[in-house]
Amino acid sequence: MTSVLMVLSAANAWTLNDGTAHPTGFWAEEFVVPHDLFAEAGWDITIATPGGRAPTVDEKSLGLAGGLPSTTRRMRERLDELAPVLAHPEDLHAIDATGFDLVFYPGGHGPMEDLAVDEASGRLLAERLASGTPLALLCHAPAAIAATADAEGRSPFAGRRMTGFSNLEEAMNGLAKKAPWLLEDRLKELGVEYSSGTLPLRPHVVVDGALYTGQNPQSSTALAERLIADLG
């Protein structure tokens, strides 16, 4: 049976450049859609967060920003059903990821706060990349590779082709001017060969060997389906 480790942020706020805390967490669609597609494919799913803390869903992802009312209603229903699992995740800092067929990081602004500076997550990502085993990061989750950089700012992800939430998309949601840093900018600073889709908020998936990335929430289905097709 194919096994997947889904790594969620445990942050419930994102510290903006004025010091205020912007309520956040994981984006509902980016967790629920891949989770359910993996489950339908018969995959074994393990959820982990830093410290094993229960993750927080970004309430914006269950409102107008999350899509049509029918979509967000379904997301909320699924999160309610998955609440017992989400309440007791594994501790990312203690888990051995080597036995998993896939490591998958959903996004939301949460990773910008905790996973971007989490040393254990950074080691996991660097080891996963070096091993050439499947790794996927969605939307803001590529922020986590910032934790792989050394004191000189060098990352093993330099030169790899990736996507992630674009500067334009951050501007469209009204947070670009308030953000302490922008994901697209940081990825480029780390030496990533960044690309985005022709149009914002449309599905865009980039595959570079065993490294898979999706640009935005709208890429959730396409990314998960590509992984299922490739990993069988």
Image (cartoon, helix red, strand yellow):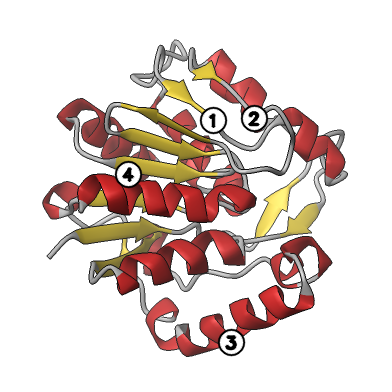
Q: Residues within 10 Å of mark 4 (few under 14, many from 20)?
A: some
The span from disc 2 to disc 3 (Cα, nearest Å) is: 31 Å
Identify residue type, mark 1: Thr
Q: Say the numbered circle drawn on residue 176.
A: none
Q: Which residue is mark 4?
A: 120
The percent position of residue 111, horizontal first and vertical second, equals 55, 48
Examine the rendering and report whether any part of residue 17 can be seen. Answer: no
Q: Tell me the element at label 4.
A: helix
Q: Which quadrant of the view contains residue 43?
A: bottom left
Q: Please tell me which residue is depicted at 54% across the width and 59% down the height of the picture.
A: 30
Measure the alpha-carbon separation of dots 1 and 3.
30 Å
Whichever of callouts 3 and 4 sits on the residue coming sooner in the sequence is: 3
Among the two numbered marks 1 and 3 on one chain, the one whose residue lies closer to the N terminus: 3
**Quadrant in which the N terminus appears:** bottom left
Q: Amino acid at mark 4?
A: Ala
Q: Residue at horizontal 53%, vertical 37%?
A: 143
| Amino acid type shown at disc 3 | Glu
How far apart marks 1 and 4 lie (CA) works out to: 23 Å
The residue singled out by tag 3 in the image is 77
Foreground disc of the pair 2, 1: 2
The Cα atoms of the two marked residues, 2 and 1, are separated by: 9 Å
Task: Report the disc number at residue 197.
Answer: 2
Q: Is residue 138 above or below residue 188?
A: below
Which residue lies at the image location 63% right of the left edge and 51% below the top edge? 218
Classify residue 76 as left or right of residue 134.
Answer: right
As drawn, 103 above or below 13? above
Question: Which residue corresponds to mark 1?
Answer: 163
Give the alpha-carbon distance from disc 3 to disc 4, as whole Å. Answer: 32 Å
Count neighbours of disc 1 (C-alpha within 10 A) and say few if under 14, some if 14 to 19, many if 20 or more.
many
Q: Are marks 2 and 1 in contact (CB under 8 Å)?
A: yes
